[in-house]
Image (cartoon, grey):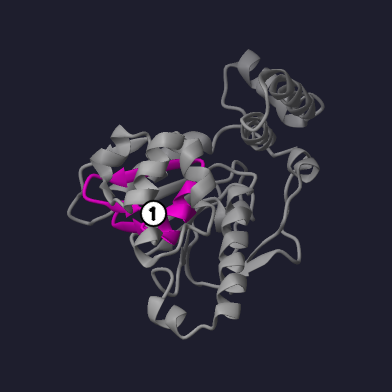
Amino acid sequence: MAAAAAAAPGALGTLQAGRARLVAACCARLGPGWRLSGSWTVPRVDPATWARGWTPAAGGAAWRRVYSSEVKKEDELRVRYLEEENRGADLKERVKMSSSEVGPFVSKIRAVINEIANLPVPTIAAIDGLALGGGLELALACDIRVAASSAKMGLVETKLAIIPGGGGTQRLPRAIGMSLAKELIFSARVLDGQEAKAVGLISHVLEQNQEGDAAYRKALDLAREFLPQGPVAMRVAKLAINQGMEVDLVTGLAIEEACYAQTIPTKDRLEGLLAFKEKRTPRYKGE
C-alpha cells in the first residue's frame, strides 16, 4: 500500500496485515541514507496539497508498527515492510469494551483507513491469506487489489450483529456494484481469489506459490511498472480519477482539466519531452 513508501520519494513500500499486504509505489528516488522511523504517521492531505506535491507532516492518524528495512543502491528498487502488531480487530478485546468505547474505537479505525485511501501515490493490496472484515476494508481503500486463488476475503460483520464500520458499506458498492455488495454484506459471504476476481473485487488472481507470497510478488511487479512514471503526474492522475468518480461527467472533465494544468509548469514535463526527443529514459525528480 502506499503507506510508508509514500513518505519518501522513489520508494516502494509495504504494509502487512496478517497475510494481506499493501504495496505503495512512489515515483521518485530516495537518497542512499533514507531510513524508516520507529513509527509511521500518515498526514491528512487536501486536494490542493496533492496537486502541489506531498511531504510528511505532523498530525494525522498515527499507526505504529514494527518494521524492517532493506536499503540498496540508490538506483535500485526500494522495498519497505511495515508489519502490523496483530491481524486485525481482537474480538476478545472488543468484548471487554463498554458501549461508549466501541464507537470512538471504530472511528479511529475508519480514520486510518480513510488516510490510506487519500494517500497521493498508487496503492496495491496484495491478499495472500485472510482479509476479513477490517482487513478487506483496508484493501478496499487501496487503488488496486490482487490476491492468491487460495486467499479468503469478505465483509463478515453481520455475523456479529454489526455492520462494516471502516468504509466497507461505501467502498464495496463502488467497487462491485450496489446489488452484489448488498448480497455479500447481507450474507457475510467469504470469497476465494477466483470468486473475488469474477465479481470484480480484485484485478488479478494468482495460483499460490510455495512461499505463500504470490499476490505480493504480483503487487511488486505492478509497482515496478508504476515507479518510472512522473511523480506529479501520478499524484494528479489519482486525484482526477478519485474525485471524478464522485461527480457527473461534466464536473469530472473540469476536475481533469484542473489536474492536467498542475503538470504543465513542472520540470518533469519538460524532461519527459526532452527524453522522448533524445530517445532515452527520462530522469524525473518530482518537480
Q: Viewer-proximal residue, 172 or 286? A: 172
* Amino acid at the residue labelled 1: Leu
Location of residue 32 with respect to 122 vertically, above or below = below
Residue 216 visible in rendering: no
From the viewer's perspective, is 137 left or right of 10? left
Answer whether residue 137 is magenta in the image: yes
* Residue at the image point whose x is 53% and y is 58% from the top: 166
- Residue that mark 1 sits on: 155
Q: Based on the displayed image, in which of its 4 quarters is residue 17 positioned?
A: bottom left
From the viewer's perspective, is 113 left or right of 256? left
Q: Position of residue 272 (x, y in %)?
A: 66, 23
* Residue at the image point whose x is 68% and y is 28% from the top: 247
User: For the view shown, which residue lies furthest in the bottom direction?
Assistant: 96
How many C-alpha atoms fall within 10 Å of the one at disc 1: few (<14), some, or many (≥20)? Answer: many
User: For the view shown, which residue lies furthest in the left direction?
Assistant: 210
Q: Viewer-proximal residue, 222 or 135? A: 135
Disc count in the image? 1
SS class, disc 1? loop
* Residue at the image point whose x is 31% and y is 58% from the top: 130
Q: Based on the displayed image, in which of its 4 quarters is residue 203 positioned?
A: top left
Q: Based on the displayed image, in which of its 4 quarters is residue 62 positioned?
A: bottom right
Location of residue 113 with respect to 105 vertically, above or below = above
Q: Position of residue 128 (x, y in %)?
A: 30, 53
Residue 225 visible in rendering: yes
From the viewer's perspective, is 285 left or right of 226? right
Q: Which residues are magenta?
A: 127-156
